[in-house]
Image: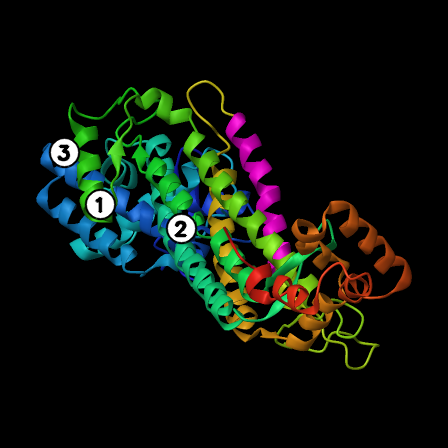
Amino acid sequence: MKTRIEHDLLGDQAVPAHALYGIQTQRAKQNFDITGMPISHFPELVKGLAMVKAAAARANHSHGLLTDDKNNAIQAACAELINGEHHEEFIVDLIQGGAGTSTNMNANEVIANIGLKKLGFEYGQYAHLHPNNDINRSQSTNDVYPTSARLAIVFAAQELMVTVANLKESLAAKGQEFADILKMGRTQMQDAVPMTLGQEFDAFAADLAAENASIDEACLQLCEVNLGGTAIGTGINAPAGYACLAVKELADISGLPVRLAPNLIAASSDMGAFVTFSGTLKRLAVKLSKLSNDLRLLSSGPRTGFAEINLPAMQPGSSIMPGKVNPVIPEAMNQTAFQVMGTDMTITMAAEAAQLQLNAMEPLIIYNLLNNCRILSKSIHMLDELCIRGITANEERCTFHVENSIGIVTALVPHIGYDNASRIAGQALLSGLGVAELVLKEELLTEEQLAEILSPRAMIHCG
């Protein structure tokens, strides 16, 4: 394999001649082999890095710090990255020491080498377009990396919100489909009062209704950036007015409402917006896990459980029990939710680990947030497409549970009194007789009265 020799603080090293990355990226690749997920695993992060570098170059060009040729080369290189090209050159592991310096240098070197080629030079001829002097001009990892990550997370959240909205619509559609199917509601795993299966699915949909608003609000917090603060927020090595101009250019390039943080020193170490965003993902995960639990319960059986709904059969469920089919899709959703809940604590601890003017644990926070967005998006899509849309109702089973439940006695309390209702419930439990049968036997109500009280219309009345 042909190589080129590059030099850095630690000396010389051979780099593959065809590589767009350089010596600092290669050292980081050698040092950090942790997750198996390089930066390229998350295209949103590469896109965010390219947008920040393009915005910085525009601001530097406006201040006379970059020539027209260099700025044009940087803009063209960043445009290709934003369009999805060359992402395979981002080879550094997401979890890394150095507070993201390796990620920043990976971007600097790739952009420099793409730009060099456009200027008519060979890869590595940095005298003509330098990763640090030109691509990283007026910047530090400490403002580039968190700003890029904020953009990346907001981009990832857009796909997540689409999947949440689609799942909500699918649940609401099932609510309409099952609107006339009467069943028993349950509290504390015991019979409660009747409801419709449609109401149950409407409630599932309603439970997700506010989630996208929460995610969107958290994204707005992430749009407050420290770009221009450079090393610790004082703006060292950046010209006056650079920060405001760079952020303005970033808003134009990204299409997001990015704004400059009011105190760049505080913003350089504060991870509060990341913690807030993680909290919204955890809240969503909790709701999705509860939904999955309910789907598994309602479909349990098929002969000895609730068996009120049927989940689509996706695969054989046992290597030893013929005919067994398991609720594999909700189970997978549960596991994704547990992962998100657990890493919320990881993110919290990493955010708390900030010291003085920087948080060196940002890579762990960013890795987990991007990964959580991705696995939630994929799992919600899976749950929607492979489970929710194919659910059918066992109407006869739902009716059987209502007719044989002691819980319907609650509807009789206003008509026969609590004491009579309690006594009837006890007798039904001991004798195995139905509540309606006992009420008629004691002549507490007529058949007509009982039929009206226990009609679906009367029992599912809401407000």
Q: Position of residue 38 (x, y in %)?
A: 48, 52
Residue 351 in the magenta stretch? The answer is yes
Q: Which residue is mark 2?
A: 157
The location of residue 322, given as percent across then percent down, is 81, 81
Give the number of the disc on residue 85.
Answer: none
Looking at the magenta stretch, what is its main secondary structure? helix
| 272 relative to 436 in the view: left or right | left
* Mark 1 residue crowding within 10 angstroms, few (<14) / some (14–19) / many (20+): many
Q: Which residue is mark 1?
A: 54
Q: Position of residue 278 (x, y in %)?
A: 49, 40
Q: Element under label 3?
A: loop
Q: Which mark is residue 65?
A: 3
Q: Residue at x 58, y 71 (%)?
A: 181
Which residue is located at x 48 percent, y 42 percent? 280
* Near-viewer residue (461 or 453): 453
Rendered position, 439 above or below 416: below
Q: Residues within 10 Å of mark 2 (few under 14, many from 20)?
A: many
- Please identify the quarter of the rendering in which residue 150 is found: top left
* Magenta residue span: 333-353
Is 29 in front, or is 9? 29
